[in-house]
């Protein structure tokens, strides 16, 4: 006797599809409302991560998997995101230090008329 897979009601998939539609509409509204700067990118990234999470959780059946499989799938991208954040912070720090210490170097290359 073959063991059949677990069946989920189709209403779950319709609810997730509706949520994805609403999140996509909100994402487009960010552009329509002409948000700028960090607010715009924060909202876009939040909506993107929510949509990706819903897709992974429901359509890839991660909600119903064992915890070890969930960790094997989700931990590596989270680690990469943390490393990207650290690199961005380090890049900003390096840029600010270079701007602070190297902006006055142009005066060393211009002839002085004081003597």
Image (cartoon, rainbow, N blue to C red):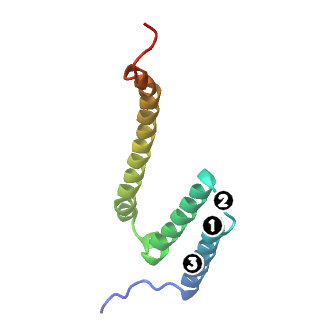
In the rendered image, the quadrant that contains the C terminus is top left
**Quarter location, residue 33:** bottom right
Give whichever of discs 2 and 3 has the lower sequence position. Answer: 3
The one of 102 and 61 positioned closer to us in this rendering: 102
Q: Residue at x 42, y 42 (%)?
A: 86
Q: Is residue 17 left or right of residue 68?
A: right
Q: Where is residue 67 shown, x and y percent of the image? A: 40, 62
Disc number placed over residue 31 in the picture, else none = 1
Q: Residue at x 43, y 44 (%)?
A: 88
- Count of residue discs: 3
The residue carrying mark 2 is 35
* CA separation in Å, label 1 and label 2: 6 Å
Residue projecting furthest to the bottom: 1
Instruction: Look at the numbered discs 1 and 2 and tell me whether their residues touch, using CB distance below 8 Å.
Output: yes
Q: Where is residue 93 shown, x and y percent of the image? A: 45, 34
The residue carrying mark 3 is 16
């Amino acid at each position: 006797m073959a063991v059949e897979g677990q069946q989920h009601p189709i209403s779950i998939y319709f609810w997730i599809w509706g949520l994805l539609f609403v999140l996509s509409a909100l994402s487009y509204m960010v552009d329509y409302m002409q948000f700028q700067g960090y607010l715009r990118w924060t909202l876009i990234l939040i909506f993107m991560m929510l949509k990706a999470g819903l897709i992974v959780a429901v359509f890839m059946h991660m909600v119903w998997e064992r915890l070890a499989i969930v960790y094997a799938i989700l931990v590596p991208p989270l680690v990469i995101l943390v490393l990207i954040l650290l690199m961005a912070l380090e890049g900003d720090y390096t840029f600010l230090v270079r701007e602070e210490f190297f902006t006055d170097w142009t005066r060393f290359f211009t002839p002085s008329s004081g003597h």
